[in-house]
Image (cartoon, rainbow, N blue to C red):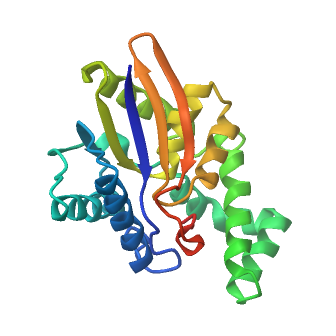
């Protein structure tokens, strides 16, 4: 059997003009992962990186530390088909209409705009409410890739990766929370809303491990943060 390890990117820049950029803490999380792997003598046989800047920065920071420790990572393969889902774009596209028609969304977003206490929590509550309705098909937005199509895309990419991995090899995949949700959802046969929920549970730079073989695809461990021992390193965005 072989092993697929999916690493969610480090903390990004939530609330900034460009979310797709690691924060200083996100870079620290990725470098801490590099130190952890090097100190435990772990070096994956394959490295795959998603297309977003936060994916690349997480991989690069981890790789830099590994190289400094004399254990350079193998050359990375970059895959566009491991891009994140479009839930954020869907949310922003629908928001003006939802503010007008949905009293709960209107109240939550008005509180965010007014800088009310817990503004970020209000925003996430509104986002989760809308994204769940989108993922379960209640909201149809043909302008964007659906959650179901996203899951199918990630599943195809995963099976493609599995098909070229030799027995007892390991693969490190740097991607986003949605990708972790899609892969975990496939491994556990989760419904769409439950696969999406994984997106909100997985921590930044957490390790999610799967056993892969021609006969088996199974979750081995989820949300492993043993390499992030300090509580301040446990973040979700």
Foreground residue, 142 or 58? 58
The C terminus appears in which quarter of the rendering? Answer: bottom right
The N terminus appears in which quarter of the rendering? Answer: top left
Q: Which residue is most to the bottom?
A: 115
Q: Position of residue 184 (x, y in %)?
A: 55, 35
Q: Which residue is most to the right?
A: 103
Above or below for 221 versus 54: above
130 on left or right of 167: right
Q: Which residue is most to the top?
A: 215
Above or below for 217 versus 84: above
Q: How many marks?
A: 0
Foreground residue, 13 or 216? 216
Q: Residue at x 74, y 64 (%)?
A: 125
Above or below for 181 versus 123: above
Q: Position of residue 40 (x, y in %)?
A: 34, 50
Foreground residue, 183 or 146? 183
Q: Residue at x 63, y 38 (%)?
A: 195
Q: Position of residue 98 (x, y in %)?
A: 72, 62
167 on left or right of 192: left
Would you say residue 190 is visible in this rendering?
A: yes
Q: Position of residue 36 (x, y in %)?
A: 37, 58
Above or below for 62 versus 112: above
117 on left or right of 85: right
Would you say residue 142 is visible in this rendering?
A: no
Q: Residue at x 30, y 45 (%)?
A: 42
Q: Residue at x 28, y 28 (%)?
A: 169
């Amino acid at each position: 059997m072989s092993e697929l390890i999916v690493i969610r990117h480090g903390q990004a820049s939530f609330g900034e003009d460009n979310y797709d950029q690691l924060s200083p803490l996100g870079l620290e999380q990725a470098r801490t992962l590099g130190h952890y792997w090097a100190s435990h003598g772990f070096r994956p046989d394959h490295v795959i990186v998603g297309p977003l800047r936060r994916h690349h920065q997480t991989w690069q920071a981890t790789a830099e530390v590994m190289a400094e420790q004399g254990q350079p990572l193998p050359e990375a393969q970059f895959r566009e088909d491991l891009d994140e889902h479009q839930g954020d774009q869907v949310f922003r596209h629908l928001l003006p209409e939802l503010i007008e028609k949905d009293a709960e969304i209107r109240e939550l977003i008005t509180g965010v705009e007014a800088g009310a206490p817990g503004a970020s929590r209000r925003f996430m509550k509104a986002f989760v409410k809308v994204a769940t309705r989108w993922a379960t098909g209640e909201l149809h937005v043909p302008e964007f890739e659906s959650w179901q199509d996203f899951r199918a895309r990630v599943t195809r990419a995963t099976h493609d990766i599995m098909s070229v991995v030799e027995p007892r090899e390991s693969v490190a995949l740097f991607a986003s929370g949605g990708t972790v949700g899609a892969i975990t959802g496939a491994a556990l046969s989760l419904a769409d809303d439950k696969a999406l929920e994984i997106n909100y549970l997985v921590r930044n730079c957490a390790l999610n491990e799967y056993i892969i073989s021609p006969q088996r695809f199974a979750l081995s461990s989820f949300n492993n943060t043993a390499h992030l021992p300090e509580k301040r390193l446990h973040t979700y965005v």
